[in-house]
Amino acid sequence: MSNTYRIAVFHGDGIGPEIMAPTLKLLRGLNHDFAFTDCAAGAAAYLDQGTDLPDASLEAARAADAILLSALGDPAVRFPDGTEMTPQIDIRIALDLYAGVRPVRVVPGMRTPLATDQPIDFVLIRESTEGLFHTQGKGLVERDHAEETLRLTRRTTEKVCRFAFDLAQTRKAAGHMGRVTSVDKANVFRAFAFWREIFDGVAADYPDLSADHAYVDAMALWMVTRPEAWDVMVTENMFGDILSDLGAGLMGGLGMAPSADIGDDHALFQPCHGSAPDIAGKGIANPFAMILSAGMMLDWLGLRHGDDALIRDAVRVQAAVDACLAAGEVTGDLGGSLSCAEAGAAVMARL
Ligand code: ATP
Ligand code: MG
């Protein structure tokens, strides 16, 4: 008996709908029972309904088994106070999606700026609900002085560390190192000594994995000089924000970077890039980050529901994208000549 998986789908703004179309086509072509619900959010939703995240959309996301979210927002459409819309952050907070998962993989055909032919395959876990983003939008600004707060809680730090170790364990079974590196700045901030103590406590529960620490500044260097040395990294919100863009850079740009935001009860899958208004409507956007994000969704659903067919398809989707990269069946941003739809069709052909 196969499960029906309810997927909340946010088509988004700019290139969002363009990259979502081939992704849904691919998912529909797999042998699973998905029930897709279309949800509005972002700039188009704001113009249409006066809110960038309608209640109905948030509730549909909450009710779904997984959330598939395309690129949202448009720099030309802002709130009256001039701030940008970030409904994805509101969803992250509302559903307590504390673990931001950012895989960094470089395979042949990717345009990495690195002078290496070693395969690169590590995962950065970014705590996504507290840290240096705690006072986001509520910081203190006076004439001669401004302040923001770094907040780490034992509960969330422990959960995100445990998430990292669980992931390293799953990856170890697939042949990876079985190593978790905590990235912090414990030499300067007492809060990170607290983080380390919690990380070490969780590490003790995983005796067959190795655990170590690195300072974030050193890690920025090592991600460039020794990118093959890492397996799973876990870090605070702001450090993770910065390092994940560095990771996207290693992959040759945003068009290749997928992501997941995962909590205890919900998970959201989204490409790292924005809505790329400069190329919207031209049909040339790279759909691979969106497709790889959908692949991460298959893997997460499969693990959660004990559905091995989903896990196998997650592996197949990634392999199909890798094969397209190796064969140069790619869009213009990667030096190819395929349209967005053609690149999606190329992945499906490889499947
Ligand atoms: P946001 O603030 O929403 O993250 P951003 O300012 O970081 O947006 P993006 O929308 O991510 O900007 O676009 C940055 C650049 O990368 C643009 O030149 C855009 O065309 C390009 N880009 C982003 N995503 C893709 C994609 N999927 N395919 C091709 N080019 C892309
Ligand atoms: Mg951006």
Image (cartoon, helix red, strand yellow):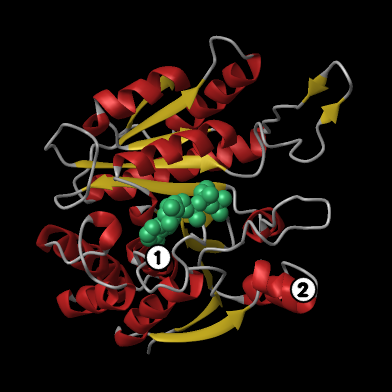
Q: Which residue is mark 1?
A: 290
Q: Nearer the viewer, residue 305 or 76?
A: 76
Q: Give me the residue at 31% from left, 23% from top.
A: 222
> In the figure, 314 relative to 114: above or below?
below
Q: Quadrant of residue 154?
A: top right
- Look at the numbered disc 2 and give the secondary structure of its residue: helix
108 left or right of 141 in image: left
Look at label 2 and name its amino acid.
Asp
- Look at the numbered disc 1 and give the secondary structure of its residue: helix
Q: Which residue is mark 2?
A: 55
* Residue 211 percent across, percent down from the top left: 37, 27
Q: Give me the residue at 65% from left, 39% from top.
A: 155
Look at label 1 and name its amino acid.
Met
The answer to whether one can see residue 2 in this image is yes
Q: Nearer the viewer, residue 276 or 296?
A: 276
* Residue 165 percent across, percent down from the top left: 41, 40
* Residue 299 percent across, percent down from the top left: 36, 64
**Beta carbon at label 1 within 8 Å of ligand 1:** yes
- Do callouts 1 and 2 mark residues in contact (Cβ within 8 Å)? no
Tell me which label, 1 or 2, sits earlier in the chain.
2
Q: Nearer the viewer, residue 312 or 162?
A: 312
Crowd band around label 2 with a 10 angstrom C-alpha radius: few (<14), some (14–19), many (20+): few
Q: Quadrant of residue 32?
A: bottom left
Q: Quadrant of the N terminus?
A: bottom left
Crowd band around label 1 with a 10 angstrom C-alpha radius: few (<14), some (14–19), many (20+): many
* Residue 85 percent across, percent down from the top left: 69, 57
